[in-house]
Each structure stands twice: as C-alpha cells, then as structure tokens.
Image (tube, rainbow, N blue to C red):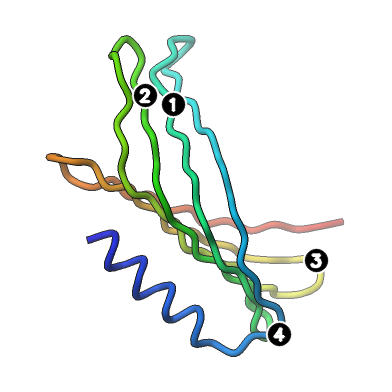
Amino acid sequence: MIKSFLSVAAASALAVPSAFAGVYINAESNDGFKGSKYTGRTIDLHIGYEGSVSKVDYYIQGGPAFTAVADVDGTDSSISGKIGGTFNVSEKLGIYGEFSGISIEDEDNNYGTKIGAKYSF
C-alpha cells in the first residue's frame, strides 16, 4: 500500500509547476530508546523531490529502510517514505506538516504524522 501511495504522491508533486524544484538524496539514521535502554535503529536511504509553489514548500521522499532491533540478530529491510510541506504564513512564520510510513513484512504498516509551527526571529 505504501508503494502505491508514494507513486501517486510522486506523480502529483512532479505534475505541479513550481518556482523551485529539485531531486535530492537523503540518508537518515533514527535510534530508539525507552528510558535509558536502547531499543533499535532504522536507517532510511531515500530519494526525494522538493519544490515550492506560491507560499507552499513541499517534499516527497522514499526508498529502502533497514531496521535493527536491540538484542535481535540481523536486520530487516522494508520500504519507507515521507511527504510534507510548509505553508509560509509570512516571512517569519511557517506552519508545517509531515506524513510518514514504513512497510513491515507480515505486520501492519506503521504511520506517523507531524504538525507544527516555526517562528523565526
């Protein structure tokens, strides 16, 4: 399901005429902890596309993800991706959001959301 979501989102982003657009590569390592106990790591190796239309900056990225759980031998690979953007209310205030997901074999997919505001002085 996440593969088809990423395909549709990528096609949509590419179809939008933009003032600034570009392809990028993003490598990211995310470590997890519960209290002081290490729980595991996921490494994302994504290719993405970002652009800007009027007051909106957007991005979409996806690719393989490699997960290692603490105290478990081996690494699982899956597909992960993110889509997000910022609505620039003014030069100093932006409201942003992100939707992310990762496929997990033989389990339900995991999804996450983020929303916030950033004010620059």
In the rendered structure, are the residues bearing label 2 and label 4 in contact, judged by CB atoms less than 8 Å apart? no
Spatial CA distance of label 2 from label 4 is: 40 Å
Which three-letter amino acid code belongs to the residue tagged 4?
Answer: Ala
Which three-letter amino acid code belongs to the residue tagged 1?
Answer: Arg
Spatial CA distance of label 1 from label 3 is: 35 Å
In the rendered structure, are the residues bearing label 1 and label 2 in contact, judged by CB atoms less than 8 Å apart? yes
Looking at this view, is 55 or 74 the one in front? 74
Q: Which residue is mark 1?
A: 41
**Looking at the picture, how far across and down is residue 24, in whole percent?**
62, 60
Vertically, is 73 above or below 95? above
Q: Residue at x 31, y 67 (%)?
A: 5
Spatial CA distance of label 3 from label 2 is: 39 Å
**Looking at the picture, how far across and down is residue 109, in whole percent?**
23, 47
As drawn, the label of residue 19 is: 4
Camera-side mark, 3 or 2: 2
| Residue 35 quadrant | top left
Q: Residue at x 18, y 41 (%)?
A: 105
Of the two numbered discs 3 and 4 on the same chain, state the one appearing first in sequence: 4
- Circle 4: element type: loop
**Looking at the picture, how far across and down is residue 93, in whole percent?**
74, 66
Which three-letter amino acid code belongs to the residue tagged 3?
Answer: Lys
Q: Which residue is mark 3?
A: 92
Q: Residue at x 28, y 45 (%)?
A: 110
Q: Which residue is mark 2?
A: 68
- Circle 3: element type: loop
- Circle 2: element type: strand
